[in-house]
Image: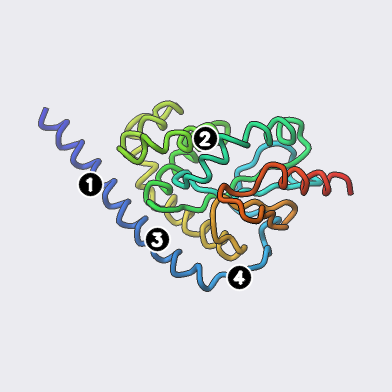
Amino acid sequence: MSDQISAQISGRTRYAAMNRRAAMTAATLAAMATLAGCGGGGAGAPVDGDMALGAAEGAKVTVVEYASITCHVCAAWQAEHWDGLKRAYVDTNKVRYVFREIPTPPAQVAIAGFAIARCAGDDKYFDVVHELLSSQDEMRADPRATLFRVGNGAGLSNERVQQCITDEAALTGAEERAKAARAAGVDGTPTFFVNGVKIITPGSQSGTSLADLSKAIDAELAK
């Protein structure tokens, strides 16, 4: 029993250490936001660490979404619009859909969730991301338990989940991807680009509308 307790304490300690590092990363990124460019440069070109669905790289139309698993607007967008976008354009291979991670507060939870998704493998990455997005209420109440539950559901053992969320390389990768997002002019989540052009729905409090996104996609497909 004492060995079990020691292991649990050790795990929590490593998790806490990861939280401190992620919190420092979040503070650094927040400071960088005022220095980031406001253009769309880099948003359409492939970026190291991209996770994608649909058409192959080099497709006529690429849709890039910058989002976070801890962003409530991102969760609402997924619940309301993802199935429609997926059915119309992703499942039909009309577009290449690229998801890019940008952690939002609490950044340590977002970074840990993305690390678990990547550990789950390319074939389960989106399953993990979408499950975390739909579990935000649970995650706010008990982030550690939620992360482990979702990781277990993707086939990862508790030990493997712990390794994923405390991996220094994962933290470094998260920092680099977030910096690239800021440099591309991303100042909120979710943010969508169609072939490198930011698509905005004026006055919307729930992100880019599916109607505006579809209009931009269809215009590019028609060229």
Residue 32 position, x and y percent, is 48, 69
Q: Of callouts 3 and 2, which one flags the residue occurring earlier in the amino acid sequence?
A: 3
Q: Which mark is residue 148?
A: none
Q: From the image, tell me which residue sits under label 1.
A: 13
Foreground label between 3 and 4: 4
In the figure, is residue 140 to the left or right of 184? left
**In whole angstroms, how far apart are the C-alphas of marks 1 and 3?**
18 Å
The residue type indicated by label 1 comes to Thr
Which residue, given by chain and number where applicable, does mark 2 sit on? 130
Q: Which residue is mark 4?
A: 37
In the image, which is nearer the foreground, mark 1 or mark 3? 3
How far separated are the C-alphas under marks 1 and 4? 38 Å
Camera-nearest label, 1 or 4: 4
Task: Compute the Cα span from label 3 to label 4.
Answer: 19 Å
Q: Residues within 10 Å of mark 4 (few under 14, many from 20)?
A: some
Do callouts 1 and 2 mark residues in contact (Cβ within 8 Å)?
no
**Which residue is disc 3 drawn over?**
25
Q: Give the vertical position of 192 relative to 129 (above or below).
A: below
As helix, strand or loop, the secondary structure at mark 2 comes to: helix
